[in-house]
Image (spheres, coloured by chain):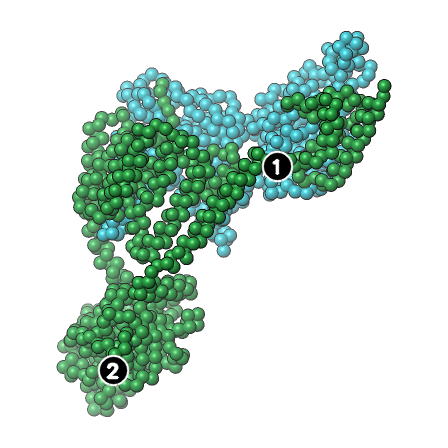
Chain colours: A green, B cyan
Amino acid sequence: MKHAAVHIPGTPPLLIGSALLFWGWQNNLIISAIVMAVLLEARYVIRRRFPISDKEFNHLSDVTAIIFFISVIYIFNEDGSKGIFTILAVNPYVLYLLVLLQVYSERGKIKLSTLFMSMRKIERANPNEAIPSIDLTYPYFLLCLLAASAGQHTGAEFFIGLCLLIAAMLLSFRPRRYPVGLWLAMFCLAISLSYAGQAGMLALQDVFRANMMQLFEQFVWRYRDPDRTSTAIGSIGRFKLSDRIVLRAATPTRLTRRLYLREATYNLYGLGLWSNSDTRFEPVAETGQTEVWELNQSNPTGKVTIASYFLREAEVIPLPHGSQRLYQVPAIEVQRNAMNTVKMDIYDGWVKYSVDYVDATIFDAPPDDSTDLYMPKNYRELFYGLADELGLQDLPDEQKIGIVEDWFASHFSYTLEQTYWHPQQDFLQQFLHEHRKGHCEYFATATVLLLRAAGIPARYAVGYAVDEYSPWEGQYVARARDAHAWVLAYTNHDWQLIDTTPGIWDALEAENASIMEPLWDVWSWVSYRYALWQAKDALKEENRTWLLLLIIPLLLYLAWRLHGKKRNGRHDSDKTTGPIEIFGADSPLYQLADIIRQKGIEQRPGETLLAWFKRYPAAQADVDMQSALALHYQYRFDPSADRKALKQRLEAVCQHIRQTLRRHESRP
Amino acid sequence: MFRGNMFRRLLYISFRGVFYINRWIRERFTPLGLLLIGAMIMAGIFGVDLKSTLSYQLFTLTAALILVAIIASLHFKGRFKAQRLLPEYGTAGEALHYRIRLNNIDNKMQKALIILDQLENPFPTYEEYRDSHDPKDKIRNWFDRLIGYPRLMGIMQRKTGATTEAVQLQTALTAVAEELTVTLKPLRRGYIRFTDITIARPDPLGIYKNIKKLPHPGSLLILPRTYRIPSIHLFGNRKYQPGGITRASSVGDSQEFLSLRDYRPGDPLRAIHWRSFAKLGKPIVREYQDEFFVRQALLLDTWLDDQPEVIFEEAVSLAASFTLASFDTDSLLDLLFVGTKSFHFTTGRGVSQPENMLEILACVKPCSEPAFAIMQNLVLERCAKSSGLICILLDWTEERQALIRKAMQMAIPVYVFLIRTETEAGQIDYGPLAEHPERFTVIPIDNIQPTLNTLML
């Protein structure tokens, strides 16, 4: 009965060539793809195969690996994380030489030790161990298809080409027991399923993307909309923001109190959403100096250098309330709205800028009573009633504020968890009269509305409360969980900051910090430094000669390996051509052998020393040749023996034998 | 941190999961199927962002092909009968071929079947994984050493003991019984256990196989690998053997003349047959059937403490080599070792057959507890009748040296072979054999045959 071991057949003619052309067409690399395809397919015409040694395969594999790593470094630096798709697209280049060498080699396959250093070690240690070999052509074929997917033709033609090439591959494996029609029907069914799957995946990704953006903003980076912000008021469950560092602030001296960095201010509230009545932004004129924008005219009392993460190229920036001027940042444009929210147009990623500010001063425009005293209908009864209850109506503004602050401080507590559900309009009612606990958004919203009910214009401000100093970085850091909301109240022709959230809030937030936080901080610092440096580099558009610094160690490694191999090769050739150093070649027994040789008795091929010595007539006499040989072999082959002592003993025995032989020879 | 038991246990559980998944995939998917799975995984990784590449199209196509193939292969109704025709023995490290007779009981013709003889392949226990040593670890990278997956696979390989190759039938299988040849590569000595004969039928696309397992337990004894040992001319004199060897036609001195043979050191002068000496020019002696003959004892050390198991395997191979070599000589060899109790088997011309001794050695197992008292009694008892003692030792501890010392006190020559890994080889104190360093040989496990070639016994 005919049977054979199961194996993978070789690729049929034109299969890899077609895949290469497909890849070249997709990535606009058609010329090189044609050359590569022709060279590979020519193996069916050129029958000559070359005796390529393992060492040559290994050399090429090493060079391929180095080229790959250099490409990865270069592409990642050029394109950032998106570079992964460029790397995918150029992969057929990287592996090409190895595949070419394989198909033209006599062996026709590549040992796994060529690809894996660890297996080379095993092979060196156990030369008899069979290392499996593989045929790279099918993996290369699939790699070409994968690389083609990173190309530019995104229409149906890609999918058609993909199906045709996969069909050609499957045909070469088709079990002969089934009719072609069945095979074809199944393949068509698979194509239909695949097509349906693609539509499903696209729909799924849209849903996923929408949900992910929400999660991303909550846990990783928050995009601050200067026009509106939704609060977590009324959300059930645990309100938790991540420990990730989202902002860094360097000050010339250590801060004596918490620094509030405002991102945005809002003046209209309705059902968990704060918004602005006026959403227009006006550009801030650049002063005579480059990269300096004057926000307000006054004499600054402090300076802070802030690094903030930009999700997109134009973002709201966190600033101290009394910001006077913004500088040391290569922004394209700086804009500001009526609420004094500042937006900067620059690049995405980490952005660093300096601000001079006046401490305890808020430069916002005077209030507009129609908005800053506006009380939503749903809350009028609640807050006017509460203002009456607290007796705020006829008091001076400072006193009103004092009573409100005291009331929140003495009757409320901070929590990140809400376990009760209520109708939308009842959240604040429940917060103020029932549960009396919540997070900063509850406190700030309730305070704004209560102050307005008491006749004080007030606004809702959001940003970061910074007071965590990182000794390691030498500057202040703010984490996502440090995002905060507070109140701006207008009294005595001036805006003042009021924060009614219990002072313990940041400690409670920090309690939930991950035990991995220090490690993440280190990583955050490294990536931050790298991002800043890269951003600077991108803006200055310097030439990228520094890349050589990364490539140099790789080239040095390559040179070292090649040199090492040459040296080893020379060593090998020395071994074969030069005198062979034999362990124990100075054995005294060889002197006896010389004596016998001088007598014209040569050792025959394969003859043992004992048999040879015994052919010497004089040695037939009573000499202890056996002991001498035992010592000689030990001297030659036992690395653990005391060689000095052994040699002395052997010398003594050989001396004795020589004397005995001489005596026998001298006899008539 | 990485050496914590919890970490090890977690690794072990993950490896077990990975192993079973891997085995399932390899058992069920054809080489084409494996290629498509690889492509699907890669395309899945690069295709996560559907807007950046079209890899998701390759992903869905390969996934759909695999799905269709699995569904199509569900219907496999063939009925088969198989019989495994094994040889009596195999030798460790040498591929052997055997036949499987296959019957198609159904009338329906079956084409392109793939047959695989399945070996018992138990997953190592956590204790085996934790406590095992593998000399190959020294050439592995730090990650493999730390994680221990290759080591785990090494244990599995040793437990399975062999590999078999799948065979694809090129012709249709009809109701007539067909025979096919399977190649088995034994990796170790001892019994190889077979469990099932698997008959797989690939789907029309050639991606997935539906399999039928025909339970067919069986076993095959794999004899130890042997080395070429220089012909043994052991030291030591002939000794009186009480009770004689009436059971065999062994040789010695007796009143009953048996034959003439070449002179050997130790033969009495009165035994020389002078006429033949004069005729042939070399001493010839008369042989009589009796109790005087050369008898050597071969002690195999079975106490494996912290050393790698490969040392023990090589010791068994060496013992097997000595045993086989003894069949070419006129002397007898007593093989001694201690397992659950003490054992001794005699081999030599006419006594026992080489296969019997190799069968015994194929099944010798290492002891984890030292049983020197038993071993000492065994050795001393045999030494009284032996002309010499060859010891194959796994270590050179005080207890072993004491044993050798006692044997030497009985005025019989002792030859020690110490099997060691290369790293352990170094300066060794010969202890009781300091006077006879030529009788002490260190055999590095990766250089056994060359070392044996230099022996002068």
Residue B66 visible at all: no
Residue B87, x across and y down, in percent: 49, 21
Chain letter of disc 2?
A: A
The N terminus of chain A sits in image quarter: top left
Tell me the crowding category of disc 1: few under 14, some 14 to 19, or many 20 or more residues within 10 angstroms, Cα based: many
Q: Which chain carries label 1?
A: B
Look at 32% across and 31% down and name the residue there.
A43
Residue A301: image location, x then y, percent: 33, 84
Residue B429 in the image: x percent, y percent?
71, 42
- Do the numbered discs 2 and 1 sit on residues whose CB atoms are within 8 Å? no
Left or right of residue A452: residue B247? right
Q: In which quarter of the image is residue A594?
A: top right
Q: Can residue A549 be seen in this view?
A: yes
User: Mark 1: which secondary structure?
Assistant: strand
Amino acid type of disc 1?
Pro
* Element assignment for label 2: loop
Residue named by callout 1: B444
**Residue sitting at 45 percent across and 36 percent down?**
A54
Left or right, residue A6 beside residue A491 = right
Residue situated in front as seen by the camera: B247 or A171: A171
| Residue sticking out furthest to the right | A668
Residue placed under numbered mark 2 in the picture? A296
- In this rendering, the answer to whether B250 lies above or below B406 is above
Label 2 vs label 1, nearer the camera: 2
In the rendered image, residue A208, in percent from the top left (x then y), is placed at: 24, 55
